[in-house]
Image: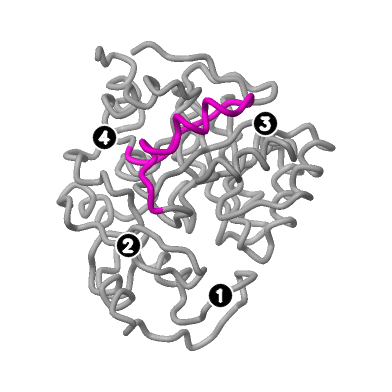
Amino acid sequence: MKFPKLKIGNLSPVYPIIQGGMAIRISMANLASAVANEGGIGIIGGTGLSIEELKAEIKKAREKTNGIIGVNLMFAASNFVESIKASIDAGIDLIVSGAGFSRDMFAIGKAAKIPIVPIVSSLKLARISEKLGASAIIVEGGNAGGHLGTDQDSWDIVKEIKERLNIPVIAAGDAIEPKDVNKMFQLGVNGVQMGTRFLASLESEVSDVFKQLCVNANKEDVITIMSSTGYPANAIRTKMSERVLSGQAPKPSSCEKCLKQCTRVFCIKEALINGSKGDLEEGIFFTGKGVWKIKQILSVRKIFKQIIEFEG
């Protein structure tokens, strides 16, 4: 495959492949460092971790690689700014902001000379991000995994945004197979973010039950639910996601106020933790809509090899 050159601030990965920062203990040091060691950008999902856990995970990743390591932090999290500062103190290379962004995060990044990369789903937000000082943006469609900002597929929005921005544009959503990655690059983007494919990798730290759900999934097995964050999200059809869909999810017995705003209809953090552990009764399993394309759990090295050697 022919790759464009991706440059985010002073960072230039060997390959313009970014691993999605899947939160609640999915994208941890093991997965992020494996991606970085193959020449991509490894991302730790920092949301849901305490400040000390976040710092420890960044340190662990640093011990495993000399490659590029970033952290994905959800703007909706109560400790968002504190987590940005802690990540910078721990020596992170870049910060990805999901589910929104704020003016102050760009100022913090600029002062520390750390690239800030927001995830956006519209041209309007892309332009605002560029104006505020984003080093690059990730354009995520409604076919991506986890919390979503649009119901339009990535294929329908990335080209328009790329043509109207001067900073690097990274596409996300439904990039599962090498031909999907190649298709994204044909749209002119500078990089591709892959979450779901790396979720079902040997290095991913979720349970084998979760990984097997990905391998066994069919097209109709991914449904869109409304998370207690207030954002829609794609998840594999299970008992818990069906209960959320029908409005019958159990209300939380306690709340640690991990989100700035929460409907408290159910606890999304608890449900995702249960999912990462493989709890088919109480867990929610976020994935992209293209999860049905995954037929085998592969190593990160094998996933990269397939992409690099693809001839489209």
Q: Are the residues flagged by discs 1 and 3 in contact, CB closer than 8 Å?
A: no
Relative to 80, does residue 302 appear above or below in the rendering? Answer: above
Residue type pointed to by label 2 = Thr
Residue type pointed to by label 4 = Leu
The answer to if 159 sits in the magenta stretch is yes
Q: Quadrant of residue 268?
A: bottom left
**Mark identifier at residue 135:** 3
Q: Are the residues flagged by discs 3 and 4 in contact, CB closer than 8 Å?
A: no
Q: CA distance from mark 2 to mark 1?
A: 18 Å
Q: Earlier in the sequence, mark 2 or mark 1?
A: 2
Q: Earlier in the sequence, mark 4 or mark 1?
A: 1
Which residue is pictured at 44% across the width and 79% down the height? 266
Magenta-highlighted residues: 151-174
Residue type pointed to by label 1 = Cys
Q: Which residue is mark 4?
A: 298
Q: Residues within 10 Å of mark 3 (few under 14, many from 20)?
A: many
Which residue is pictured at 53% across the width and 40% down the height? 43
Q: Which residue is mark 2?
A: 224
Callout 3: helix, strand or loop? loop
Q: Which residue is mark 1?
A: 262
Which residue is pictured at 47% across the width and 55% down the height? 25
Q: Earlier in the sequence, mark 3 or mark 4?
A: 3
